[in-house]
């Protein structure tokens, strides 16, 4: 089962290409300096959603995956947020 963060990343990688082979940052094909802002906003939103869903229960397991917390999805989301803060 793919995580939500992985799905968002795949969506971005498969986004249509505009002039000069650039990928559009959004399905609407945003252009200019807003491309990066939209891309980062999408990554942040996806990471926050994943972290909201993949929380630790009292036994120390992920509430969604059931595996040891932090699960892979939560770890990937944390890493994405850390990259945005850099």
Image (spheres, helix red, strand yellow):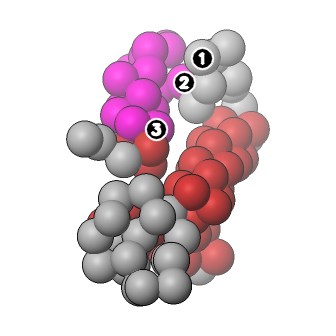
Q: Which quadrant of the structure image shows residue 84?
A: bottom right
The tag on residue 27 is: 1
Residue 31 place in picture, x, y as percent: 68, 25
The number of callouts visible is 3
Q: Which residue is mark 2?
A: 24
Task: Relative to 11, say whether 35 is above or below.
Answer: below
Is residue 68 visible to the viewer in this orientation of the structure? yes
Establish if 53 lies above or below 15: below
Q: Which residues are magenta?
A: 7-24
Q: Residue 65 falls in which quadrant of the image? A: bottom left
CA distance separating discs 2 and 1: 7 Å
Quadrant of image for the C terminus: bottom right
Q: Is residue 9 visible?
A: no
Residue at 46% from the left image edge and 38% from the top image edge: 8
Query: Which percent across, then down, holds residue 3?
Result: 36, 47
Residue beneath the point at 44% across and 21% down: 15
**Residue under circle 3?**
8
Q: Are marks 2 and 1 in contact (CB under 8 Å)?
A: yes
Q: Is residue 74 above or below residue 41?
A: below
Q: Residue at x 69, y 23 (%)?
A: 30
Give coordinates of residue 12: x percent, y percent.
Answer: 45, 32
Residue drawn at x 41%, y 70% as measured from the top left: 62
């Amino acid at each position: 089962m793919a995580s939500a963060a992985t799905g968002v990343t795949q969506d971005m990688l498969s986004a249509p290409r505009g002039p000069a082979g650039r990928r559009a940052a959004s399905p609407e094909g945003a252009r200019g300096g807003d491309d990066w802002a939209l891309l980062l906003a999408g990554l942040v939103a996806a990471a926050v959603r994943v972290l909201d869903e993949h929380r630790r229960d009292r036994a120390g397991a992920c509430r969604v995956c059931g595996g040891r917390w932090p699960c892979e999805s939560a770890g990937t989301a944390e890493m994405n947020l850390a990259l945005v803060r850099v």
